[in-house]
Image: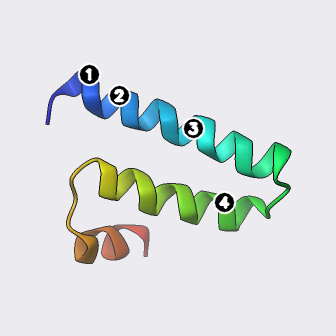
Amino acid sequence: MSVGLILLVVAAGVALLLLLVLKVRINAFISLVITAILVGILAGMPLKEVTVAIQ
């Protein structure tokens, strides 16, 4: 995966995190976990590694 695409995924993750916290009013911790899972999956990590990385 190219560096530009990973930066785009991270930028989208930050935007999603802000949206969840500020507009949807979800708890910040839950929003961060959701965003971390999605960014990990979109970055190409296997799902098993994503859960280990979040722990």
- Residue at the spot x=72%, y=51% of the render? 20
- Residue at the spot x=29%, y=34% of the render? 6
- Residue at the spot x=27%, y=29% of the render? 5
Q: In this view, does 31 lie to the left or right of 34?
A: right
Residue 31 image-quadrant placement:
bottom right
Q: Regarding mark 3 in the picture, which secondary structure is present there?
A: helix
Estimate the spatial distance between the alpha carbons at disc 3 and disc 1, rounded to whole Å. Answer: 15 Å
Residue 36: x, y in percent? 47, 57
Q: Regarding mark 4 in the picture, which secondary structure is present there?
A: helix
* Residue occupied by mark 3: 14
Mark 4, Cα crowd under 10 Å, few <14 / some 14-19 / many 20+, is some
Name the N-terminal-most of marks 4 and 1: 1
Residue 4 tag number: 1
Estimate the spatial distance between the alpha carbons at disc 4 and disc 1, rounded to whole Å. Answer: 24 Å
* Residue occupied by mark 2: 7
Residue 31 tag number: 4
